[in-house]
Amino acid sequence: MGCDVMILFILVFLTAFAISIALTPIIKKLAFKINAVDVPKDERRIHNKPIPRIGGVAIYIAFIAGILIYSTLDRHVYGIIIGSTIIFIGGFIDDLKNLKPKYKLFFQIAAALVLIFFDVNVKFLTIPFAANGESLYIGYIGTAITFLWVVGITNALNLIDGLDGLATGVCFISAISLFFVSLISGRSIAVIMTLVLSGACLGFLPYNFNPASIFLGDSGAQLLGFLLAAISIQGAIKSAAAFAIAVPIIALGIPIYDTLFAMIRRKINNRPISEADRGHFHHRLLDMGLNQKQVVLIMYSVSIVFGIVSVLAMLLTAKKSFALLIIIFAVTLSFAIEFGLLSKK
């Protein structure tokens, strides 16, 4: 990697960082003027005073600006820009009006379909135990996988946005992990996008970390989830490589597993899957007596481990990559059972 490339990477990151960190104080003032604040109303809320909740505005502007400045504007990039705009608009309306779940889903479906239309789509599936790690072209099955992946990850990031700085920090770590994945796999557009996204997150994080002076809101949390989903498709899953499916699943381990266990837990308790509860990993840690900062730092540490493993998985064959994914799932499931993440209580 040449010096010029390194300088470009630093400039991309710092541009998004600067825009995000400069805009956030302005967005905070705007939030109070338009009454876009989060008022604590139930036991799930950790804060005890009104907090602005449209932090996603700063991240959205920083991301779009960074992409327009540094990225090649091809069909795939246009799809991600349009899709992220749809998600952002839906989230922003929700931050102002508290949309019903079905209307949130409408925006998520629309954004996912835009990605598919613009060919940001899973096209190959690796055969884990084939002799040479062959990949199959999967056509419409790939379209279905893309749709479920985008909607699922979009909601997953939103679900873990329960503590100051948690979703923002996890997204930053995941984006850095996907940066290395995309760099190794030679996906230049995804490399730029991960740098822009990570810079935007880090610029917002000082205001969002405990004690937070502004929240992501749905406009931010859903946007981050959507962007991670879209970039992971563009940077890894879209390729016909051995690590195509396993790597992003590992890199996004925190939101994926927390959401999966939440769905199982609510099913066990005969509660609607979309109904919020206090059974998430971060809630369990709080119930143990840890404070917000301690819990968030633990979650960051776990996310870093997932990220490192995802990058190391790039060096494995299809069979070993698939086996690693199974091992991680088994260990995580055992931990979830032991920790009570699937408990009826």
Image: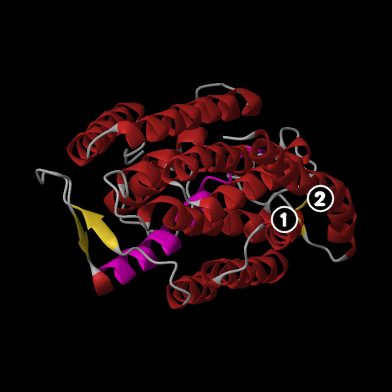
Residue position marked by numbered label 2 in the rendering:
19
| Residue 67: x %, y % from top left | 68, 59
The reply to whether callout 2 and callout 1 are in contact (CB within 8 Å) is: yes
Q: Secondary structure at mark 1?
A: helix
Name the residue beneath numbered marker 1.
66
Q: Residues within 10 Å of mark 2 (few under 14, many from 20)?
A: many
The N terminus: image quadrant: top right
Would you say 225 lies left or right of 126 here? right
Residue 317 showing in the rendered view: yes
Q: Is residue 92 left or right of residue 24?
A: left
Q: Residue 18 placed where, x, y %? A: 81, 45
**Quick check: 236 above or below 219?**
above
Name the amino acid, label 1: Gly
In the image, residue 147 lies in the stretch drawn in magenta: yes
Residue 35, compared with residue 246, is above or below; it is below
Q: Residue at x 27, y 60 (%)?
A: 124
Q: Earlier in the sequence, mark 2 or mark 1?
A: 2
Q: Which residue is more in the foreground, 82 or 76?
A: 76
Q: Which residues fall within the magenta stretch?
A: 141-165
> Relative to residue 217, is residue 37 drawn left or right?
right
Of residue 22 and residue 332, the one placed in the foreground of this image is: 22
User: Could you say which quadrant of the image residue 60 lies in?
Assistant: bottom right
The percent position of residue 174, horizontal first and vertical second, equals: 52, 40
Q: Residue at x 53, y 59 (%)?
A: 226
Q: Residues within 10 Å of mark 1 (few under 14, many from 20)?
A: many
Quote the CA–CA distance across marks 2 and 1.
9 Å
Q: Between 225 and 236, which is closer to the camera in this rendering?
A: 236
Q: Quadrant of residue 38?
A: bottom right
Residue 323 lies in the magenta stretch? no
